[in-house]
Amino acid sequence: MGFAYDLFRAALRAANRLVGSPLTYSQDGLYTIHNADFLRDPRFVAANAQAVATDHGLGPNLHLEWRIYVCCWAAAHALRHPGDFVECGVHSGIYSRAAVEYVQFEKAADRKFYLLDTFEALPADQLLPEEVEIGVSEHYKYRDVLASARTTFAPYPNVELVPGRVPETLARVPSTQIAYLSIDMNAVVPEIAAAEYFWDKLVPGAVVVLDDYGWRRHIAQKRGFDRFAAERGVSVLSLPTGQGLIFKS
């Protein structure tokens, strides 16, 4: 397998010795000895396979299982409440493709899932100076994936792609009730704009998934959403995946 793989295996063995128990998950910056049996759930396995098969361009060994599972869980939770689904920051559709597979969204004929993204580049002019300084624009090099995203979601008549920049495209979502909101635009300005626009449309019990909340590179987003939540009398649940969750009360 090569030197890098041998080094990884050695590090994994060292980590196992350190914690005294076999690791059950060791990907994407998350290492744990706790139960991870969702990884063997056929329903999740199928959803994850569809997610990593999208045209993400992130290499052949993409391992975002725990983050994908959080989105799947949140989507299943949202189905117990009235309202449409919205994702701001889609790219190839890793999270949204997993979610629709996991909950069989095509059967929810009375709901729509709106996917908002440029489907190409991260708009550099939306970055704060501190985000530029920390290297956000250099880290995310996206290509045009609109055509492949349309193909990915073609089997779902109730999934609608909304190409363009946020916040300009927000008004193209006509929903008055929203049960699921996923935000992953890698920059605080459009993310807070989306949260502010959709907050009053979120139904009681709705869930907001923040993909970048706990990552060091995205400290500006954490600070922004901490303020946003405090102003509305709620809080963000920080997850070891790097994500954050907000529930609308």
Image (spheres, rainbow, N blue to C red):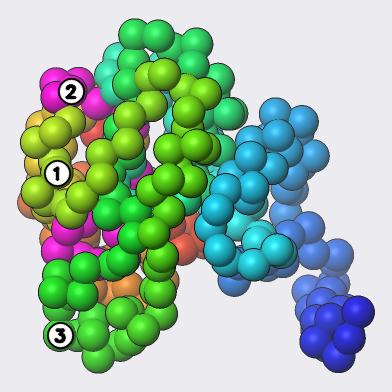
For residue 149, side relative to residue 10 (left or right): left
Choose between 14 and 209: the one closer to the eye: 209
Residue 238: x and y in percent read 40, 58
Residue 9 in view, yes or no:
yes
Give the residue pinned by disc 3: 129
Contact (Cβ within 8 Å) of mark 2 with mark 1? no
Give the residue pinned by disc 2: 175
Residues at marks 3 and 1, CA–CA distance in whole angstroms: 24 Å
Contact (Cβ within 8 Å) of mark 2 with mark 3? no
**Residue 55 located within the stretch drawn in magenta:** no
Q: Residue at x 17, y 58 (%)?
A: 190
Numbered range of the magenta stretch: 174-191
The disc at residue 169 is 1
Near mark 3 (Cα within 10 A), the count class, few <14, some 14-19 or many ≥20, is: few
Residues at marks 2 and 1, CA–CA distance in whole angstroms: 13 Å
Residue 102: x and y in percent read 59, 28
Amino acid type of the residue tagged 3 in the rendering:
Pro
Residue 96: x and y in percent read 46, 39
Q: Above or below — where is 155 with respect to 198? A: above
Give the mark, 2 or 3, whose residue is nearer the N terminus.
3
Q: Residue at x 63, y 40 (%)?
A: 50
